[in-house]
Amino acid sequence: MERTSEGSKRDPLQRGVAGFRFAGVAAGIKKKGGRDVAMLVCDAPASTAAVFTQNRVKAAPVRLSQRHLAKSHGGAHAIVINSGNANACTGPNGDRNARTMAEQCAYLVGCEPSQVLVCSTGVIGQALPMPQVANGILSAAAQLRRDGFAEFAEAILTTDKRAKTAVRSVKIDGATVTLMGCTKGAGMIMPNMATTLTFVATDVQIAPALLQALTKAACDATFNAIAVDGDTSTNDTLTVTASGRSRATVRSASSPAGRAFATALTALLADLATQLMSDGEGVHHVVRFAIEGAKSVADARLVARRIAISPLVKTAIAGGDPNWGRILCAVGNAGIAVKPERLGLLIAGIPTVVNGEVVPAWKEKAVAKAMQATSYDITVQLGLGKHTASYLACDLSAQYVAINADYRS
């Protein structure tokens, strides 16, 4: 399987994905300027899977996209996105504006409004500046290109420091399948999917229901196993759209073709999720919390998640402080039965706790030095079973507080 991501010497984004055109333009929605309207269009209605936020306060574009996917039975022709304004908590006017975006895009593309998904990201509670949005959609439609993915990926950003893209290709039945994706998000990142806005285009032939099942499974292992700050957004959406232009067909999840595609999709999403974590607001350290020896995968995930979102653990990571007691405290607060006398802990591979007690003459200075790295692992051994799980998390820095204290200005 070929792997190419942002920063590679190659530029696979210029090749695009068969059956798709992309655009990203500046419409004046963002106060600080830059691209803020994006459009993804397939040559024909395409199999589309999506995973949305589980926050009960859902933004107007999320609710509309959910209805459209249900009405079209997983067949989308286009996705239109604006950044700089979330169109969330905006009442009936927000619903009308989301519908207007879908209708304008549908008219320009030549499809039914129900075949258009709408996504928005940015400040919550402010009405969309529809004149700018409308002009942006018109401009994006005029600039759609096969090689426009880089501009598309840039136009979905808010407080991100850089665009986050990835590409995978995999051989299925002798044919090459391409997957190209991008993500945005630097704060308000927490599982309950989809965690920010993420878009994947692929040329594989696959039915919508099967694509949905494979997408959900890939998300559970990637975007549902990361946490920046413990907050799930009102607008989170992840979509995977398949044009069917490749000669490769996936007919079942258990077939060799299904397993190959699932592996490629999971690898792509893992790449994007890792990039998202490293680009988090005020992030200086990305830590993988690995849980071993749990009675079940569900228990392992509960423990990993609790540690990953603990403010005390996250601030210790920010300061490079090997305060292992905070980690064990988070384990005990995870809501599962534990046996303290069986707990083990390794920080950056260095044994720190064995059988619930600190290792005699443990190497605190070595651990503190290891915690200065930009990425490392923290492993918790529960000693209760054979199941495992992991989460990607990060530090909580003063810079994160500064960014979010000044977000709307």
Image: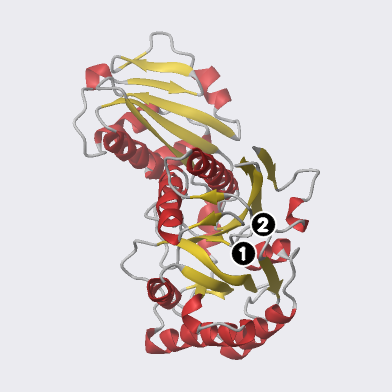
Q: Is residue 350 above or below residue 240?
A: above
Q: Looking at the image, is mark 1 or mark 2 earlier in the sequence?
A: 1
Sort mark 1 into few (<14), some (14-19) or many (20+) by Cα contacts within 10 Å. many
Which x, y percent locates residue 345? 38, 21
Q: Position of residue 388 (x, y in %)?
A: 36, 29
Secondary structure of residue under mark 1? loop
Real-space Cα distance between discs 1 and 2? 7 Å
Image quarter hosting the C terminus: bottom right
**Residue 163 circle label:** 2
Indicate the quadrant where residue 16 lies: bottom right
Q: Residue at horizontal 74%, vertical 65%?
A: 146
Label of residue 259 in the image: none
- Residue at 43%, 47% in the rendered image: 252
Q: Position of residue 245 (x, y in %)?
A: 63, 59
Dot 2, crowdedness within 10 Å: few (<14), some or many (≥20)?
many
Q: Residue at x 57, y 34 (%)?
A: 375
- Between residue 197 and residue 90, name the one nearer to us: 197
The x, y position of residue 286, in whole percent, is 54, 39
- The residue type indicated by label 2 comes to Ala
Placement of 278 over or under 295, stated as above or below: below
As shown in the figure, which amino acid type bears the numbered disc 1?
A: Leu
Q: Secondary structure at mark 2?
A: loop
Report the colour scheme.
secondary structure
Q: Residue at x 56, y 60 (%)?
A: 242
Q: Is residue 126 visible?
A: no
Using the image as rendered, state which of residue 158 and residue 244 is in the foreground. 244
Quadrant of the drawing holding the N terminus: top right
Give the numbered dot on residue 157: 1
Q: In this orientation, does residue 370 appear?
A: yes
- Mark 1–mark 2 CB contact (< 8 Å): yes
- 151 relative position to 201: left or right: right
| Residue that sits furthest to the top in the current view | 360
